[in-house]
Image (spheres, rainbow, N blue to C red):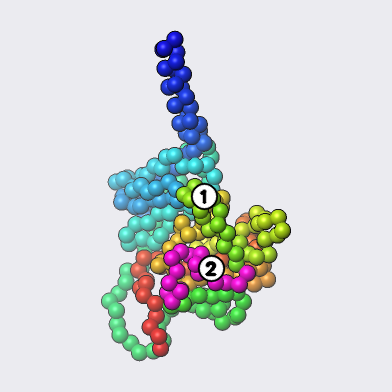
């Protein structure tokens, strides 16, 4: 009898672990350069999972990944940041191939008089800002706000509603437009994020605050409806009817200091 009781106790301890393992999946992959050369020492990270480093053959493995949508982030010194949405299914292993592109090598600074040169992404930002649709914040304006998290910037935009909901790591801030809030509460219609020109789905109960930090942001664009959204940010595959928020970040070599006042 004592032996059977011990066995039942052991099974009761193991069962939650087995259920948790069945509810999660695994992500494996290889990090290579543009010429398919394996890249070691790349940092691979997903929110809520942790970080691993690629080995000498460029291989990596993330285990215990909760099933659902995630964003894979890969960084390596001298290369551009890599971001890619991935979907993990319970009990399955997903394999990916990550190709990193070299970041431009910065030249020694030269003191010149005149208007500072803008990065291509910032030229587009300034052109859209001049057009007048949406709300725009550049690096200087964001620095003056002294935000702790990204949503501290977004809450300043009229019509943007920041909702605090329970998350896997405590309360998390979700971004919605005011018109999606009805008498019965929020409808499932979140805004669509873009990061550096690429769609960046933020799903479930994970906030944009867990992916991007204010110190890395160069500029933010907020479009509250489809009539404001520029053509390059109209996604046929992803829902954008509630609005679009575009975030531009440093790619690794840009000066992160705000521009000097004239």
Verify whether residue 128 appears in magenta.
no
Q: In front: mark 1 or mark 2? A: 1
Q: Exactly how many numbered labels are in the figure?
A: 2
Residue appearing at x 37%, y 72% in the figure: 256
- Name the residue that disc number 1 marks: 167
Residue appearing at x 34%, y 57% in the figure: 76
- Residue 34 in the image: state x and y as whole percent: 39, 56
Verify whether residue 155 appears in magenta.
yes
Tell me which corner region of the image, top left, top right, bottom left or bottom right, holds residue 193: bottom right
Q: For mark 2, does the 10 Å Cα neighbourhood hold few (<14), some (14 to 19), or many (20 or more) residues?
A: many
Tell which residue pokes out farthest to the top in this image. Answer: 1
- Residue 202 in the image: state x and y as whole percent: 54, 55
Tell which residue pokes out farthest to the front in this image. Answer: 2
Over which residues does the magenta segment extend?
A: 142-159
Q: Nearer the viewer, residue 255 or 161?
A: 161
Tell me which corner region of the image, top left, top right, bottom left or bottom right, holds residue 55: top left
Circle 2: element type:
helix
Image quarter hosting the C terminus: bottom left
- Name the residue that disc number 2 marks: 154
Asked whether, in this view, residue 112 is left or right of residue 248, the answer is: left
Residue appearing at x 60%, y 67% in the figure: 160
Residue appearing at x 49%, y 67% in the figure: 152
Q: Work out whether residue 241 can be spotted.
A: no
Classify 55 as above or below 118.
above
Q: For mark 1, does the 10 Å Cα neighbourhood hold few (<14), some (14 to 19), or many (20 or more) residues?
A: few
Classify 236 as above or below 19.
below
Which numbered dot is residue 179?
none
Asked whether, in this view, residue 252 is left or right of residue 89, the answer is: left
């Amino acid at each position: 009898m004592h032996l059977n009781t011990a066995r039942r106790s052991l099974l009761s301890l193991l069962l939650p672990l087995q259920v948790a393992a069945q509810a999660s999946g695994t992500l494996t992959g290889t990090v290579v350069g543009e010429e398919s050369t394996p890249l070691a020492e790349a940092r691979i990270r997903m929110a809520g999972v942790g970080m691993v480093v690629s080995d000498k053959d460029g291989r990596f493995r993330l285990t215990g990944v909760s099933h659902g949508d995630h964003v894979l982030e890969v960084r390596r010194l001298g290369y551009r940041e890599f971001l890619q949405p991935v979907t993990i299914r319970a009990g399955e292993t997903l394999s990916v191939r990550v190709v990193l592109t070299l970041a431009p090598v910065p030249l020694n600074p030269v003191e010149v008089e005149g208007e500072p040169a803008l990065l291509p992404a910032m030229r587009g930002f300034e052109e859209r800002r001049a057009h007048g649709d949406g709300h725009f914040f550049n690096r200087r304006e964001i620095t003056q706000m002294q935000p702790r998290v990204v949503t501290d910037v977004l809450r300043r935009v009229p019509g943007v509603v920041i909702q605090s909901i329970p998350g896997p790591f405590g309360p998390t801030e979700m971004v919605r437009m005011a018109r999606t809030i009805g008498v019965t509460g929020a409808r499932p219609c979140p805004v669509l994020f873009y990061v550096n020109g690429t769609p960046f789905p933020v799903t479930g109960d994970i906030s944009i605050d867990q992916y991007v930090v204010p110190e890395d942001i160069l500029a933010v664009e907020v479009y509250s409806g489809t009539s404001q959204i520029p053509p390059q940010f109209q996604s046929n595959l992803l829902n954008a009817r509630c609005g679009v928020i575009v975030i531009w970040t440093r790619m690794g070599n840009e000066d992160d200091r705000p521009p000097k006042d004239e």
